Image (cartoon, helix red, strand yellow):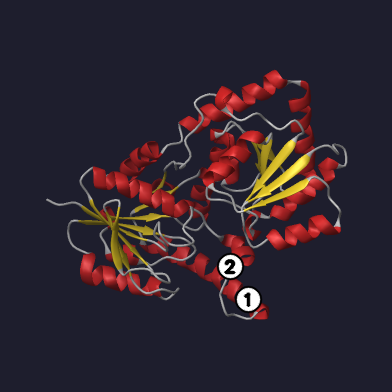
């Protein structure tokens, strides 16, 4: 008997805005194909896309091209793909398709990487909508997400998959039963360094790295923390790499407050990102919340510790990756930076041991492990 798995989600791996969630979906699906499954990704389209193509053995079917396509996808699934041998993974990312409710509980799972919650008010974009109307749309999104989660918790009796204890707890608070929630690990595309000895040398001056200045990551918090920290460590520097909707605001703040030793790298390749991670003494991240916090493991893979806010999802990744937590405000982060700078300056043995622990933890964070967790969670 053939085995078919259909994945309904917002984006496929070739979508221009594909990110960590899409990478996880794709890598898990590649392994399903390897093990004899027919895998289909049913997703909305995007400008310039083809209606259907095969990527790494995965059949990608694109239906519609806007928020309304998430209501077209369940109809397409029921009309063309649902049968007695199909297993459905219904990804809930901000909004859900509810296609899982048309399947027996044993043949469906919901995958929730994270719950947006207040992130709706920081990163939601509706192109063409006047700025003054945006808060209304954000508020509607915030409300609809909560209602959808409540309805799914009431009606769905299958497995709910997530990636951290924090998100599992949030799902339970929305009404899901704890015994139906299963946690899987994730993976990273970067290959961990073989040893610290092959790493690029650390910068002579204490260097803080900030990646991806997007609004939901609250880069201004890290910049303000660095500004406070630098008042007592004037030789230190801040590197800001990647692109996002907060770049202009961050640049304006740096210029207006005459903060020295801040370097904007702009868009960087994966190779350049890994080189910057190797050269910086610490990566700082100050998001609202995360599903997990992949950037922690990516930094660990380059032998670099991470200092981050004690917020849902990120706290799980930092605990796993030997990171340093601080209260979610710039003053607390500045104090934690000062402690890290003291460690680097006065005890290289301890700092090297911390780097080694970070590197070792990253080695266990693989897509093969995530795949094993996924198979166990779904019972496939």
Kindly identify the residue that appears in the image at 42 percent across and 50 percent down.
23
Write down the residue under mark 2.
124
| Position of 65 relative to 299 (above/below) | below
- Other residues around mark 1 within 10 Å, as few (<14) / some (14–19) / many (≥20): some
Q: Position of residue 121 (x, y in %)?
A: 63, 66
CB of mark 2 within 8 Å of CB of mark 1?
yes
| Position of 235 relative to 134 (above/below) | above
Asked which quadrant contains residue 347, the reply is top right
- Asked if residue 316 can be seen in this view, the reply is no
| Position of 2 relative to 63 (above/below) | above
Q: Position of residue 235 (x, y in %)?
A: 83, 37
Kindly identify the residue that appears in the image at 15 percent across and 52 percent down.
2
Mark 2–mark 1 Cα distance, whole angstroms, equals 8 Å
Q: Position of residue 174 (x, y in %)?
A: 50, 58
Write down the residue under mark 1.
134
Residue nearer the viewer, 143 or 9:
9
Q: Position of residue 218 (x, y in %)?
A: 68, 55
């Amino acid at each position: 008997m053939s085995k078919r798995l259909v994945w309904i989600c917002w984006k496929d791996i070739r979508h221009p805005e594909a990110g960590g969630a899409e990478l996880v979906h794709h890598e898990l699906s590649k392994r399903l194909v390897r093990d004899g499954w027919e895998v289909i990704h049913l997703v909305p389209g995007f400008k310039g896309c083809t209606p259907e193509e095969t990527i790494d053995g995965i059949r990608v079917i694109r239906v519609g091209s806007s928020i309304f396509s998430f209501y077209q996808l369940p109809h397409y699934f029921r009309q063309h793909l649902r049968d007695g041998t199909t297993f459905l993974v219904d990804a809930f990312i901000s909004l859900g398709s509810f296609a899982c409710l048309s399947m027996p509980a044993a043949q469906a799972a919901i995958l929730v990487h994270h719950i947006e919650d207040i992130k709706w008010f920081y990163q939601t974009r509706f192109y063409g909508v006047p700025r003054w109307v945006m808060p209304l749309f954000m508020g509607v999104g915030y409300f609809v997400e909560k209602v959808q989660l409540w309805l799914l918790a009431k009606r769905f009796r299958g497995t709910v998959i997530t990636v951290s204890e924090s998100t599992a707890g949030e799902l339970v608070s929305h009404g899901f039963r704890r015994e139906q929630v299963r946690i899987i690990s994730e993976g990273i595309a970067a290959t961990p360094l073989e040893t610290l000895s092959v790493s690029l040398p650390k910068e002579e001056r204490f260097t803080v790295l900030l990646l991806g200045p997007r609004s939901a990551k609250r880069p201004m918090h890290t910049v303000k923390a660095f500004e406070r920290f630098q008042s007592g460590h004037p030789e230190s520097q801040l590197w800001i790499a990647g692109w996002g909707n907060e770049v202009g605001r961050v640049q304006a703040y740096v210029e207006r407050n005459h903060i020295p030793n801040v370097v904007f790298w702009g868009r960087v390749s994966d190779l350049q990102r890994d080189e910057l991670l190797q050269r910086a003494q610490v990566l700082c991240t100050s998001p609202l919340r995360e599903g997990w916090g992949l950037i922690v493991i990516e930094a660990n893979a380059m032998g670099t510790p991470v200092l981050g806010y004690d917020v849902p999802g990120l706290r799980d990744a930092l605990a796993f990756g030997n990171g340093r937590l601080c209260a979610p405000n710039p003053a607390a982060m500045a104090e934690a930076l000062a402690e890290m700078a003291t460690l680097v300056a006065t005890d290289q043995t301890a700092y090297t041991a911390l780097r080694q622990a970070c590197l070792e933890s990253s080695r266990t964070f693989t897509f093969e492990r995530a795949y094993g967790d996924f198979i166990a969670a779904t019972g496939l």
